[in-house]
Amino acid sequence: MAIKAPFQLLMLLGIISLASSLSVSSRHDQENPNPFLFKYNRFQTLFENENGHIRLLQRFDKRSEIFENLQNYRLLEYNSKPHTLFLPQHNDADFILAILSGRAILTVLNSNDRKSFNLERGDTIKLPAGTIAYLANQDDKQDLRVLDLVIPVNKPGQFQSFLLSGSENQQSFLSGFSKNILEASFNADYEEIERVLIEEREKEPQHRRDLRDRRRHQSSEANVIVKVSREQIEELSKNGKSSSKKSASSESEPFNLGNRDPIYSNKFGNFLEITPEKNPQLQDLGILVNAVEIKEGSLLLPHYNSRATLIVAVVEGKGEFELVGQRNENQQDQREVDEEEEEEEQDRSRQVQRYRARLSPGDVFVIPAGHPVAVSASSNLYLVGFGINAENNQRNFLAGEEDNVISQIHRPVKELAFPGSAQQVDRLLKNQKQSYFANAQPQQREEESQRKRGHVSSI
Amino acid sequence: MAIKAPFQLLMLLGIISLASSLSVSSRHDQENPNPFLFKYNRFQTLFENENGHIRLLQRFDKRSEIFENLQNYRLLEYNSKPHTLFLPQHNDADFILAILSGRAILTVLNSNDRKSFNLERGDTIKLPAGTIAYLANQDDKQDLRVLDLVIPVNKPGQFQSFLLSGSENQQSFLSGFSKNILEASFNADYEEIERVLIEEREKEPQHRRDLRDRRRHQSSEANVIVKVSREQIEELSKNGKSSSKKSASSESEPFNLGNRDPIYSNKFGNFLEITPEKNPQLQDLGILVNAVEIKEGSLLLPHYNSRATLIVAVVEGKGEFELVGQRNENQQDQREVDEEEEEEEQDRSRQVQRYRARLSPGDVFVIPAGHPVAVSASSNLYLVGFGINAENNQRNFLAGEEDNVISQIHRPVKELAFPGSAQQVDRLLKNQKQSYFANAQPQQREEESQRKRGHVSSI
Amino acid sequence: MAIKAPFQLLMLLGIISLASSLSVSSRHDQENPNPFLFKYNRFQTLFENENGHIRLLQRFDKRSEIFENLQNYRLLEYNSKPHTLFLPQHNDADFILAILSGRAILTVLNSNDRKSFNLERGDTIKLPAGTIAYLANQDDKQDLRVLDLVIPVNKPGQFQSFLLSGSENQQSFLSGFSKNILEASFNADYEEIERVLIEEREKEPQHRRDLRDRRRHQSSEANVIVKVSREQIEELSKNGKSSSKKSASSESEPFNLGNRDPIYSNKFGNFLEITPEKNPQLQDLGILVNAVEIKEGSLLLPHYNSRATLIVAVVEGKGEFELVGQRNENQQDQREVDEEEEEEEQDRSRQVQRYRARLSPGDVFVIPAGHPVAVSASSNLYLVGFGINAENNQRNFLAGEEDNVISQIHRPVKELAFPGSAQQVDRLLKNQKQSYFANAQPQQREEESQRKRGHVSSI
């Protein structure tokens, strides 16, 4: 009996494998997870205190081999309470910031000047690698939430923050220089440099501590996100620029996704997008940024991106996405697969695979180029996405009245390709009066269907 | 005796290794194969029916580490009978199509329009990733043969086809969406969608099958390459554009290699080439496309490409190529070699290695940048090549009257570099009156040589 | 007792690990070496004879994983005696040559023409991949020293030289072609081709050797760097061009770093730099070239590069550099580290690490993007650097009167970020009257400091 067990297991596996090759199989929150979905627990907390937190999403390429082209992209979430400041630092990575909620003042330093920007929901700005910057939440009530696409410059998929000022568990990078170098650089005694610029340790004598403002000391020593007074905020916001209402094409200023007309819009939803062609900050990185609103009970119609891979975060609301891929993508998720074998597998198997998942705020999903996708909203859904390899990207819709790629097919090819006649195909395509966004449970059809079936619900 | 065998083997290996490091060694269809040659059996059949086939060449980087820079390039061969159609599909890869023979109609779909192109031998066109396209063979007699360079966008060296319509063993990607999504997307009952757009399964009741045109049903269900009537072809070819005779620089239209003057031409051969600088479709990919005719008994003179790596397919004829590399390239072919060791080896060994192979139709060979090569034709030879990393590529000829890089050398450097005097070198270089292409067995020299040697043949 | 030992070791390791996470640790010529420093013994000799040598630095990415982005860059040093010639060859790599000392004539061949350039200290030129070139030292007394950044086109980090003429241990690539191909190519007997173009082997009959000029034969057969007479040099230098005094923006001509004003200069040092934006030869490679002179006893003030990684060679003088990184960079140097673990480590640990090393001529050090660095000179120090990923690079200084990024911080943020008050911070920053370069041991401060401390030296 003990010897037989493995055989039974193998048989079972054989049956499953056979089954999955005969019909479309669906993955829905199963044990073996949908590799395109990153639930919120796949973020790792880099920093957290009472003023806010920073979380970094797992590396895409460590999740699955299908994301090899996302190797050098990371997704970061920044969240801070009202009247707080993220202290000055620079990173060895380019950042694209998208403001999800709240009102921020971002200050960017150069050797010769500084610029401050007032940012609000929908504002997007590139922070080039190495830029020293600090970010304040100027709102009295609302949390500041920022989604960052991070593109490291030194090591693929890895980046470092260099903090100008130190704190209890984070040292100022200035403290990395030796006493000699610091004294010569600032032309001052090391004691003074340490006292004025470099954070002190616990070993510091109590009496010197007492000389300084206790409140300030604590808040700054506490951590990298600190409390800041209303007066201080006001000083920061002086001369601050807002995203231009006219142009989305500045070299360094923020642009708002909502300042342009939506590229797709109707009563079921809105689709806002800035492509690399439209914005010089996104151009050399080949990145697009978009924001999609899907109203409760609505559907973003099936479509695919021709070249871009989309990384999409759920900001608000609930819903579901369906992504169509091929069976072997899931197998490639297994790291152990022999490479030769994998290739054969790729070329042989053409079974269609449905990847499906429920969406909640904080979740992230990835839509590779060419893969058809549809998203439905069970409550008002707000998504923000970054597109990689987005230059010359085209979005092809597979249903809907306008911009429907299927309706462009020559009549005789429709006849040859589809089981229905060309007339039947055209009639079917014309049945959907909406474009881009539609009702996820169209009443009319539902009723008709119920009449036909004798009121049996079509779940 | 049993113990001694391994020692004898080691000694033998030692002697071979010693021998190969003392003199130029040649590889000619040996057991340990020439890594630059891909015989036709290195293509894998992706699809085949009575109407045609699709074959994909082995990954270059899986063949040998020397092709690491070809990691994201694949070569695909498409072949279809007269009056056939390759059904609509898109790929997560850019394609560069070169028509080898036959007459095609390629239709390219966008959300808002479609374009059809009449293509014939020498025509080349880029099909950007994600474009839904279908390809008909409009000729009454001739097979359509297409060579495709494939540049995946999602995963290096891997790509997927997304079929809009399904068939027996290939599912439509539409079938990947759930019933709910499909019903909402098309605002129709699932039954109708399935009947009209999605291919049915075996479980389909017989009576419904009978309702439809049997002939059409069979041809479409049979596979992705289907038969198509003359009338249907005519409908497809309406408004079809041909490659422009004037310009080779359209953003999306096909260009013919023969529409420009050959870059090199004489009675022994012709060399046609479109470089990325000349064509916007090839520019961002940095690809060149060329076609070379070498007449029977002729030779493409020794030359090398300064930056481009050429992937060359033998379309017609027979011949031989010789490629000059270095000894260690072959060793790197062994995957087991320790990396550190490999590097030392590279830097130390400078032994010249000849790689030589007979060429037959269907064979593919690769010429890395900087590597000298010569090709001779034993029957009229027609080659089509794709060049990777082709921006600013220069072709330097090492023999021939014109464009001979050796003849540019300063007189005193000729004296120092070569065993002969500068005068002797110049006299030798001037002996070849032809440029680019020459007689592979020059009669005159042959006769003289025979006279000198007393009629001993110089094999 | 024997069993306990491992436990004790583990405890010891634990303590060390704990210690290093509590305070800044410094690495100074320790056993476990500073990964940013490449001492001269990390060059490997590719070739050496009495006329000169060629040395190639170890692959950056084989030294440490932190240099993954330098995978396709190599550093090469060329050194030759007066009146010598490096024989014609081409490489499957782009070269950027920087002349460190001496006077050279570089000849670059094309199929249709040749160009010769007179080069001297500070001259820089790109030699594109595949270009046949030869290099003479035209000086009567001084050695020619050239530093080359090598960017391979075929295989990442690996390149090959193709020698047009052979020698004892280096074969001409022409000898790689078969007798048949050579005879047809040159329309001549193989005997003549061998005698005139291809170097002969030891097996050559003595009598034929005697027919040729012995002196010339020996010098060329000796090796790839050969002696050359004054008359021959003169013939080479005819029509030679020098680097333009006006423009640094030619497509193919050399440019001199000194032809433009230094970007930073005072009595303590000079900083010369050509960025990719300023020069078309460097533009597509995204490379910058710079030369830095730091006077004895002076300091290049702490700064970092926003995007560029600098590879810096010490040409003359002695000094010291300090680089500030993070603790885990050193750990990543261990290849064995599990990748998952490594990532966690990266994200958790923010300990600042000082990397410090003495500099001597021939040493090379690497400064990754974003990493603060300072360099002091104990004798006049002359550095030449290549910057990778240099497009839009910014250099941010952290001390000094002008261009000091810290002084740009808003007053309230200074208060929050630093332990001192904003006034104290400003006073400290103003204490350094110099910019970019300063006195490494400022007298004034030193004296004051001694007065305060009662003449205790501040080592």
Image: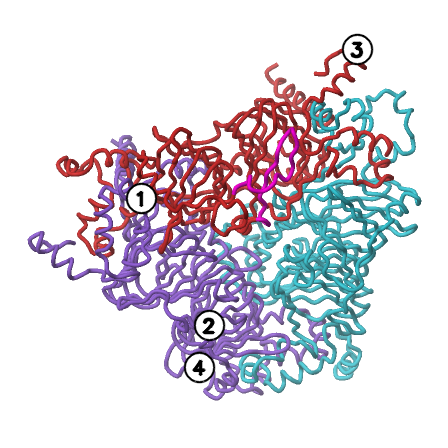
Chain colours: A cyan, B purple, C red
Pick the quarter of the image with the N terminus of chain B: top left
Which circle's residue, 2 or 1, is located before the other in the chain?
A: 2
Label placed on residue B352: 1
Cα distance between the residues tagged 3 and 2: 85 Å
Which circle's residue, 2 or 4, is located before the other in the chain?
A: 4
Cα distance between the residues tagged 3 and 1: 73 Å
Query: At label 4, which amino acid type do we have?
Result: Gln
Asked if the magenta segment contains residue C264, the reply would be yes
Q: Residue at x 49, y 36 (%)?
A: C121
Marks 3 and 2: same chain? no
Query: At label 1, which amino acid type do we have?
Result: Val
Marks 2 and 4: same chain? yes
> Compared to B178, does B322 lie above or below?
above
Q: Residue at x 49, y 83 (%)?
A: B237
Label placed on residue B138: 4
For label 3, the residue is C454
Marks 2 and 1: same chain? yes
For mark 3, name the chain.
C
Q: Which residues are magenta?
A: C256-278
Q: Nearer the viewer, residue A306 or A172?
A: A172
Residue C84 showing in the rendered view: yes
For mark 1, name the chain.
B
